[in-house]
Structures are given as structure tokens and as C-alpha cells.
Image (tube, helix red, strand yellow):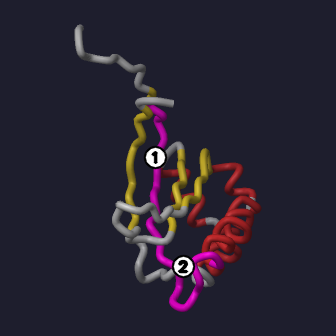
Amino acid sequence: MKGYTFVKIKITNMLKFTFLIRKTGGMKKEDFIDYHKNHHAPLFMSIPESEQYVKKYVVSHPKIIEGFPLPAYDGITDIYFASMNDFNSFFASENYKQKVHPDESNFIDLNDVVTLVSDEVVVVD
């Protein structure tokens, strides 16, 4: 058809949990990003449940670009699971509850987190 481009759509069959996060009060932006990428992410991946249940784990931090609105959040964490059972098993694990979760309050304002659950369809990869 003239004027249309057809793309191959890839459905991942995974649940994507997106957490929009803000840094704790008084923490510098650079310190927040460093802590998130270089301390918390490795800690998150260090527990065996990450290898067992997590299919993909991504941390992102907004860029300030002239002409665009200032970001509403300081960071984004995307965690992919194959099922709700895997999600529940991961977050119910003793390793997560004792090692990872307590670290979150060191850099995240836990009273101001937005959570989105979605299924991801990759249109261009």
C-alpha cells in the first residue's frame, strides 16, 4: 500500500514493571545516579532470585535537553518478569526483603514512586 510502512512487531510475552522514582531529599542528582547505577543495581543483581526470576533489568536517568520540559522524575527502573508468579516470588524472597529492599530508602523517596505494569510490544528493534 502506498504511503504505509509495514514493520515486524515483536511481542515479548513478558510483564514489564516500570518504577518512576525520585531521589531522597537533599541528595545531589549526580550522587543519586551514581548510587542507582553503581551500588543498587549490582546489589539487586547479586541475589540468586534475580537470575532465577528477572528476565531484564534496566535503570535509566533523564537527560535535560533545551526545549523540552524538565523531567518530573529522577530515575526509571524497568524490571521484566515472565509471569506474575515470578514477580511475586521475587519480591517475596527473603534475599530481596533483607538485602535489596532496605537499600532502596538510601536513595529513593519511597513515598513518591509511580508504578506501571505493562506488556511490551517491540515495534522496531
- Of badges 1 and 2, the one in the foreground is 2
> Pointer 1: what residue?
15
Spot occupied by residue 77 in the image (x, y as percentages of width and height): 53, 61
Does residue 83 sit above or below 64 in this rendering?
above
- Answer with left or right where residue 91 lies relative to residue 4: right
Label 2 secondary element: loop
Amino acid type, callout 1: Leu
Around disc 2, counting alpha carbons within 10 Å, would you say few (fewer than 14), some (14 to 19), or many (20 or more)? many
First along the sequence among labels 1 and 2:
1
- What range of the chain is rendered magenta? 11-31
Residue at point 55%, 91% (across, down) = 26
> Pointer 2: what residue?
108
Q: Residue furthest front?
A: 66
Q: Residue furthest bottom?
A: 26
Spot occupied by residue 108 in the image (x, y as percentages of width and height): 54, 79
- Answer with left or right where residue 40 lies relative to residue 69: right
Residue 119, by quadrant, is top left
Q: Which sits in the foreground, 80 or 28?
A: 28
